[in-house]
Image (tube, helix red, strand yellow):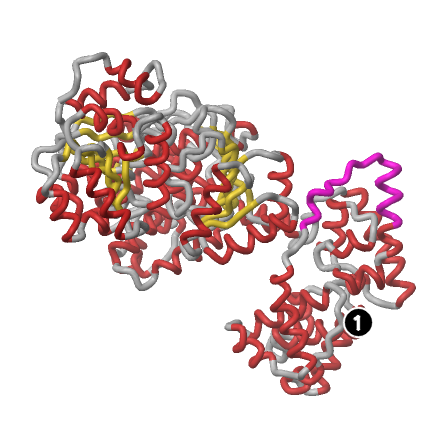
Amino acid sequence: MYKDVSLTEHLQKYFGFDRFKGKQEAAIKNVLEGKNTFVLMPTGGGKSLIYQLPALLMDGTAIIISPLIALMKNQVDAIRGFGTEDNIAHFLNSSLSKAAVHQVKEDVTNGKTKLLYVAPESLTKEENIEFLNKIKISLFAIDEAHCISEWGHDFRPEYRRIRPIVNEIGGDAPIVALTATATAKVQHDIKKNLGIINAKLFKESFNRANLYYEVKPKVKTETQIIRFISENTGKSGIIYCLSRKKVEELAATLQVNNIKALPYHAGMDAATRSGNQDKFLMEEVDVIVATIAFGMGIDKPDVRFVIHYDIPKSLEGYYQETGRAGRDGGEGKCVTFYSYKDIQKLEKFMHGKPVAEQEIGRQLLLDTVSYAESALCRRIILLHYFGEKYQTENCGNCDNCLNPKEQLDATNEIVIGLNAILEVNEKYKAEHITDILTGKNTAAIKSFKHNELKHFGIGHEHDEKYWNAVFRQSMIAGLISKDIENYGLLKMTKKGHEFLAKPKTFMLVRNHDYEEDIESQSGAPAGAISGDPELFAMLKDLRKRNAKKLNLPPFVLFQDPSLADMSIQYPISLEELQKIQGVGPGKAKRYGKSFIELIKTYVDENEIERPQDLVVKSVANKSKLKVFIIQSIDRKISFEDIANAKGLEVKDVISEVEAIVHSGTKLNIDYYIDDVLDEDHQEDIFEYFREAEDDSISSAIEELGEDEYSEEDIRLIRVKFFSDLGN
């Protein structure tokens, strides 16, 4: 089958390396012996070499089944780049012209081509099956094999059709399945669906010691990203977003802030998409903003950061996408922005799908939430998910290990949690057991009569996040396991039974509450200001003095979040002040002069270095809705008609109008208010705000009475109040 020469010599001859990594050589020998092989190695672990070298040494042509056209092109270019002839490797997919397809088939037939990359869709075409039946096939390599499993992060139904085609064209050729991400469940699915249950497994550690993991609250995300990239100038990075629209918007925002960035998603035409990818590979741009379609197999070893603007749908997806950083063993920063609202959005997307698919999707999301909210070492959680134990408790290279959270003695709660699992005969998921412990009378609890159990409500003093942490950390400690075959039912382990028989002190790490972080950083609740407290206090005093002179409530000049933003960004010109949250040109011009003078003096006296990179320029097209609303109000169009024209709800239009007015633009919405509110009600609300200490809607409802005044009524008059008196 191949010349009896040292494999290392062939490695040197074809690829220029003088030694193999990890289990590469053992796996290659297994393939060369004609045996089915399962390769489970992290991104950057050298998986492709395991089929490429045997393909060059064996008789016939290797068929490599790969999910992405861009991936095939890169792999073929890489093989040819090692100095072998151009026809040694080809790809066969829908991007080729008829003439190109003819040339590929001719080279394969003549025995010149050793590696033929094929998309699973192309593999099933009758003419291709007919063609492949006529050639000698050395091996089949199924790359990104996790696509075969519904539990995988990128399930593709066409991957399920690979085995029948292999049976038809392959004869006795060995199968090599390769993936960088697969839980035990996904591994079983891959082997079962490919008919290689007895394949030898070659598995490397999932630990990528050079990667730094961090999860941040999703607030002022664009600003945080621009600051991060500015601190990493000239380094290559990928930013992942879930929607194509967000990819386009974020790429445009980065561009206007002098960052070399381009978008990448499946909705773009092929030439532009491919061109953007090439510019990233050739380092003409530093950053690619992309959907998850980008990066599979992209051979760029020096990606220095991977940012997730949106939380991924599964930990497999997260692991694979973060794995595109630091493939050369150098620095790799992985930063994810998290808000539970994103999880709720992803759950909504599942509606309408088959029940089993929804159940799988929810389980994968729950694991992602646990990872994001946990204060345990992120490396421990990730490796545990893939069935690997990390030997130390502190990796020293993630946000949780560098900034440890407080620990609590939770021995009693662990005992309660384990006993609750036993009380329901190990037949329920964590959420259901949490509902029992917290005393929630859900429909499921009632139907199973679990509100009559001894443990019902026993843990009501803790919330569900606390109990989720109890079960997650019990799992990592090996006290319980999750039966993934049965949608995540919690089962006791031998170690768990031993713990119950003789409990030992169990220290629980308190989870993060990112929603609390988001609220505090957005300036929503009183007292949650995260800027320069001394400057903030001075700005409040100045606002109070100026408001008194103008006979206006202080909040009409600038609201607290605006003062907080000033205390973070230190604007010292009217132009900079306009960029502050809730200010805009109108307010800056009308009220800003004394504020920027105070800030400038403060900055000079305290020798403060201002974070100029936080002044994020916005993209012009983002203001289209604002312009449309202003023009519609000028034409006295009802809010209902404005909402219908833009696919919004009336409350959304009011929110946009509030933002416009708070930024200093004067709007006359009397025509609409007169239609929905009588004169007396208008006057009552207006007078309330004239005397009020703040502009809180909840305080206004409490004072005025919710039976007589709706939230919408109060918000409309507040807009009028700000516009008439403030602007």
Membership of 608 in magenta stretch: yes
**Whole-percent x and y of residue 488?**
28, 44
Q: In this view, does 179 lie to the left or right of 130?
A: right
- Report whether 282 appears left or right of 90: right
Residue sitting at x 16%, y 20%: 2
Farthest residue, direction right? 549
Name the residue rendered at 48%, 51% in the picture. 340
Examine the rendering and report whether any part of residue 460 can be seen.
Answer: no
- Identify the image quadrant of the N terminus: top left
Kind of residue at badge 1: Arg
Q: Main secondary structure of the magenta part?
A: helix
- Tell me, yes or no, if residue 592 can be seen here: yes
State the residue at coordinates (64%, 75%). Answer: 705
Mark 1 neighbour density, 10 Å: few (under 14) some (14–19) many (20 or more) = some
Give the position of the C terminus as an image quadrant: bottom right
Numbered disc total: 1
Q: Which residue carries the number 1 mark?
A: 690
Span shown in magenta: 597-616
- Of 366 and 409, nearer the camera is 366
Left or right? Give the position of 162 relative to 232.
left
Name the element at disc 1.
helix
Residue 505 higher or lower than 691, as above or below? above
Q: Quadrant of residue 636?
A: bottom right
Q: Please tell me whether residue 649 belongs to the stretch shown in magenta.
A: no
636 w.r.t. 283: above or below: below
Residue closer to the observer: 667 or 363: 667
